[in-house]
Amino acid sequence: PEGGMPSGRASPRTGEPLVRARLTDATAVDLAPEGGGLWLDSATFDTLTGTPWAGPDTRSGPAPPAAAAALAALAPLPNLFLRSATTLVFLYALLGAVGIALVEVYDLSLRDTLLSLAIVSAVQFAIGPWLTDITLSWLYRIDWVAPGDLPPHLAAFLDRLCAEQGIKVPRMGVLRDGAPQAFTYGWSPNTARIVISRGLLDLTEPEEAEAVVAHEVGHAVHWDMFLMTVAQFVPMVLYAIYRLAVNLRPKSSDKDQTAAVRVAVAAGAYLLYILSEYAVLWFSRGRELHADRFAGTATGNPTALASALVKIAYGLAGRKSGTGKEGDDSESGDRFRPVAALGIFDPAVARGLALKTYSPGRAADGAAAHGLDADDLKGAMRWDLWNPWAGWYELNSTHPLVARRLAHLGTQARVMGKVPLVTFDEARPESYWDDFLLDLSVHLLPTLATLGAAAAAVVPALSRNTALDLNHLVGGVLLALGPSLLLRFLFTHRGGAYPDMSVAALLKQVKVSAIRPVPCVLRGTIIGRGVPGYILSEDFVLKDDTGILFLDMRQPLALWEILFGALKGERFVGRKVAVRGWFRRGPVPYLEIKHIDTADGRTRSWSPVAKVVWGVLVTLAGLVVLTQRPFLSVPLPTLF
């Protein structure tokens, strides 16, 4: 925007004041900061497109009734026992096949090897919960509490649910942090621990908090912690076999006779390790859906868990009922005297985020009952359902996409005679595969450039049967790598205008990924650490008038980030800030910080600067190597 100056017009949809934003040097448009829409008059539209305006575009409107009905007719969840048994049999069959090959090629006792790895895995499983207890106590701001210290409604619900399931009430931990978080761990249903944050209760209604806890109890009741340990044992062993195959000597004294076999065993073990990792992830996603189903049945209201997922995962949330003041994060507030934890998201990305919406809900379905804006909710779901990157992230995640979980919970709600939270009935306006392929090409550019430069040096030497000039090889690779790193940086950290945006507006963006950002400025209050309760977390969670979002503070060195979190992180909590950076979408939405401004001054992320410096240094190194006299030539037969 041109200094964020009002344009004098109001949004036709929401009535909010519009500001001026410049698309080109000669073209300015009206931007809705909260809603994220661009409003063009007919003359501006004609200038930009070169064609007369033909009326409103309805391609992203509601889908035809048949399509909406097809969306509602979701398939039932697969049988939990059959899925578990099939996955474990498949994984251990892979392990057995590789073990047989290992015994045939090497002087190695498969029994002793598997026994050793099984003992290691058993010890890890046995002491794992204790180690997690110690880690939480030392590095997190956590209180271990009695169930009676929970909010009365939650304590009563937990007592009733555990009695119905015939298990002990889990040990409860509460993270003293305003960002939402929940997870569970332990050995068995009767030894489970559930940890939640104060922010989780601050963002959810009582029935939503109960649904989240029920989801975690579902993991315990289904023995998910034990079964996931059994499943994860297979990738661990396959990777160990791969390392053994690389390092161990074969039976035969003649290495040439078994070299090809050894390479095949090592490569096969590694490929099966990758395959088994994806099998375990698939296994985990299925168990998450069953935990969702358990929570919907236990509470009698699947929509409660659906709305909690929206608030924690998307960052979309509704108006909180009650008399608590907005933004009151004081630890003396006893509304959250502790709570419980859930692995409701992939632990690798469980850096809680939530969006709190205070505007009146223009809602359909069950969203209005939970204070949610249906337009904002459907806007956030578009990325999950339309952008190809979402499918890739789900494939590599322990949890299904939130939009898919909402669909399953919606089906369960209908069966139980409840109103689903939302029915996504919008038609995809276009294919997003062209943007995906461009993003992927940019991401792979340094790798492709490096391989191309190496081939340009090696192939001519091979064709002429001459020695390989290492100056040409090393210099060419560096000279290709440096500029490609800089080009990728220009795409992933694009500059220009940084318009003031809201969290709600950012979540509606579909053409965004970890590679393709949306430059913006967010203004609001830091309510907690990126990893809730973690005293070394360098990241934050910001809340504006429409919601909260994860902020990613990056520095060139990991030690730098740890020191920043330990020494400076806490001073930002509770402060009003203006953050300039790049909004990205991955397994969770987040904003990569360029700099963050408070009343005390500016704090900068030096990671972007370091990336530019590194690209320039690599380029200069390539030029230096290429311009030097040849220092070494290697005959190709010694390399191949």
Image (spheres, rainbow, N blue to C red):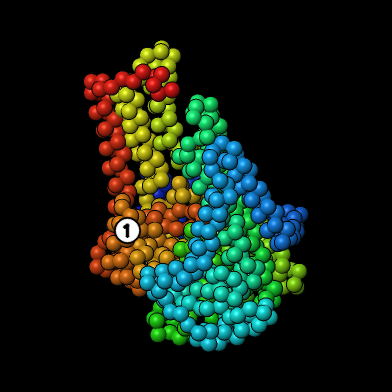
In the visual, does 140 lie left or right of 55? left
In the rendered structure, the answer to whether residue 374 lies left or right of residue 86 reads left
Q: Residue farthest to the top?
A: 464
Residue placed most toward the observer, 176 or 638: 638
Instruction: Give neighbour class at mark 1: few <14, some 14-19, many 20+ (Cα, 10 Å).
Output: many
Quarter assignment of residue 551: bottom left
Type of amino acid under label 1: Glu
Query: Considering depth in this image, is 216 or 415 the residue closer to the camera?
Result: 216
Q: Residue at x 68, y 58 (%)?
A: 84
Name above or below for residue 236 compared with residue 415: above
Residue 109 image offset from top left, x and y in percent: 56, 46
Q: Quick one: quadrant of the C terminus?
A: top left
Figure disc tally: 1
Indicate the position of residue 447 as horizontal and vertical percent values: 43, 35
Residue at horizontal 35%, vertical 73%? Answer: 574
Q: Where is residue 372 in the image (x, y as percent from the top left)?
A: 57, 70
In this view of the protein, which residue sits in the foreground, 403 or 378? 403
Q: Name the residue under label 1.
A: 561
Residue 564 to residue 140: above or below: above
Question: At x 42% / y 16%, what residue is drawn?
Answer: 462
In this rendering, position of residue 275 left or right of residue 594:
right
Residue at horizontal 38 percent and vertical 46 percent from the top = 494
The secondary element bearing badge 1 is classed as: helix
